[in-house]
Image (tube, rainbow, N blue to C red):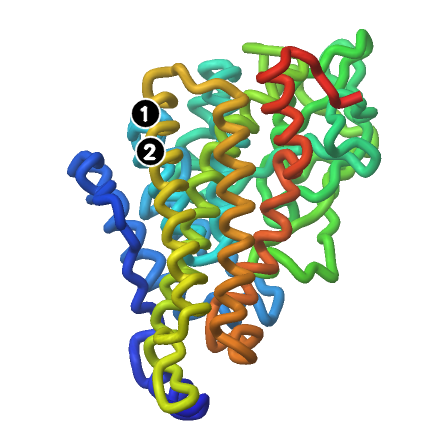
């Protein structure tokens, strides 16, 4: 079949024909609720994301209407108790939700995981009852969008060196500083911001849109996560009410615990992107003919597909086991770090191999490969770079930190 014929067939069919690989019958390990949650989100992605995602990415457009739709389908804060508007689900359900959304697009998953793991999670874990009642239901149903401010222009892998600070002014705090590479920032109604007090202790503060001196400039020129909105958080003598301080925990461990939750979701999400690349490559290999037969009949193509499926299967098993540990409250930072690092690397490698199978068509928007590959270049860096995660595991193995 010629390239022109393949394009014509693809355009005449439903855009999203994805079928999830399950070589080791991992579905047998899932509960019925897990399968129902996954099915619901898969249908959502096929209806609300897949038909438009290539255009959004090509045009560097964040579809703000998706926020309310995510809320309606239960993608925000699924592990937060129902009394605060969450889904009351377990961590395997949460992982499957992230997997399905990132199968659609990493930028879309970033929007959802920031909202759930980096905004709702700290408010739920460390906030007051008043803060929970005020913010969580609105965040859960998509009436409100949030972002998470930790990374600074000069402090990425070393967040403890942050210079953003706040001073006690009696009836309020005065916040100054800046954060960058902040997903959701340009559209966010609130920001959970980490800053140092006058003693140098890190605390979380809820900064609300409209507070004088608070701005969120958009980051332009991205080649990655183009359907996600990214920006900065700038604080110029922002008066933050004292009731907006998160009192439940202070110190660097507070924001890092939020990153654990987010990294767990990324481990599942990245595998979703890998699955999409594999599924597309398999279909293309069976349809595309060269030398009079499908390219899937050639040894090197079969080698690529076999290695893709092997790594996806290993990643599925890692995620399932990690999900069980999360449900039991036993998962460690190093275990979560291993899954994030491994699965993102696996997904990047699969995207690159899938691009090879698609040949020249792999760089076009007719297929999702190049978009996934570009997105994953951000995912491999944010919330702990690949190398930092190696050092997290290395410290766990040896007991010796090698960060400095």
User: Callout 2: few (<14), some (14-19), or many (20+) C-alpha neighbours within 10 Å?
Assistant: some
Q: Quadrant of residue 241?
A: top right
Query: In the image, is 206 to the left or to the right of 139?
Result: right
Q: Residue at x 55, y 21 (%)?
A: 257
244 in relation to 286, above or below: above
* Above-or-below relation of 68 to 249: below
Return the residue at label 1: 324
Q: Is residue 350 above or below residue 238?
A: below
* Residue under the image location 65 percent in, 43 percent down: 381
Q: Nearer the viewer, residue 153 or 292?
A: 292
Frontmost residue, 362 versus 138: 362
Name the residue tied to disc 2.
320
Q: CA distance from mark 1 to mark 2?
A: 6 Å
Cβ–Cβ below 8 Å for labels 1 and 2? yes
Quarter assignment of residue 21: bottom left
Identify whether 101 is placed above or below 333: below
Where's residue 289, x and y in %?
A: 39, 86
At label 1, counting other C-alpha atoms closer than 10 Å, the crowd grade (few under 14, some 14-19, many 20 or more) is some
Check disc 1 and report its element: helix, strand or loop: helix
- List x then y, in percent, for residue 86: 35, 31
Residue reaching furthest front? 299
**Would you say 259 lies left or right of 90 here?**
right
Percent position (x, y) of residue 177? 81, 31
């Amino acid at each position: 079949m010629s390239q022109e014929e393949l394009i014509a067939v693809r355009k005449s069919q439903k855009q999203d024909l994805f079928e999830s690989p399950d070589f080791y019958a991992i579905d047998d390990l899932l509960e019925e609720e897990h399968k129902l949650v996954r099915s619901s989100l898969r249908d959502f992605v096929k209806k609300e994301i897949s038909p438009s995602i290539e255009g959004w990415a090509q045009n560097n457009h964040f579809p703000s209407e998706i926020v309310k739709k995510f809320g309606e389908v239960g993608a925000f804060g699924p592990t937060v108790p129902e009394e605060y508007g969450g889904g009351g689900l377990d961590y395997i359900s949460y992982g499957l939700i992230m997997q399905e959304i990132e199968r659609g697009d990493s930028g879309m998953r970033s929007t959802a995981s920031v909202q759930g793991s980096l905004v709702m999670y700290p408010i739920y874990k460390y906030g007051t009852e008043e803060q929970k009642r005020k913010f969580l239901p609105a965040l859960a149903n998509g009436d409100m969008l949030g972002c998470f401010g930790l990374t600074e222009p000069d402090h990425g892998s070393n967040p403890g060196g942050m210079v953003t600070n706040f001073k006690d002014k009696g009836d309020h705090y005065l916040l100054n500083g800046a954060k960058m590479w902040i997903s959701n920032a340009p559209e966010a109604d609130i920001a959970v911001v980490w800053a140092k007090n006058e003693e140098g202790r890190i605390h979380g503060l809820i900064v609300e849109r409209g507070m004088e001196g608070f701005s969120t400039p958009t980051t332009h020129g991205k080649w990655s996560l183009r359907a996600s909105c990214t920006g900065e958080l700038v604080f110029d003598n922002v008066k933050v009410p004292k009731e907006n301080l998160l009192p439940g925990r202070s110190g660097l461990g507070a924001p890092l615990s939020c990153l654990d939750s987010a990294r767990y979701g990324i481990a599942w999400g990245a595998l979703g992107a890998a699955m999409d690349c594999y599924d597309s490559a398999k279909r293309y290999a069976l349809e595309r003919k060269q030398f009079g037969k499908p390219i899937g009949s050639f040894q090197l193509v079969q080698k690529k597909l076999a290695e893709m499926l092997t790594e996806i299967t290993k990643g599925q098993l890692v995620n399932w086991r990690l999900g069980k540990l999360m449900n039991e409250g036993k998962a460690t930072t190093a275990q979560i770090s291993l899954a994030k690092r491994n699965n993102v690397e696996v997904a990047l490698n699969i995207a690159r191999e899938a691009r090879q199978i698609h040949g020249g068509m792999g760089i076009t928007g007719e297929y999702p490969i190049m978009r996934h590959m570009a997105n994953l270049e951000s995912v491999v860096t944010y919330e702990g770079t690949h190398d930092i995660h190696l050092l997290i595991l290395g410290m766990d193995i040896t007991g010796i930190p090698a960060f400095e």
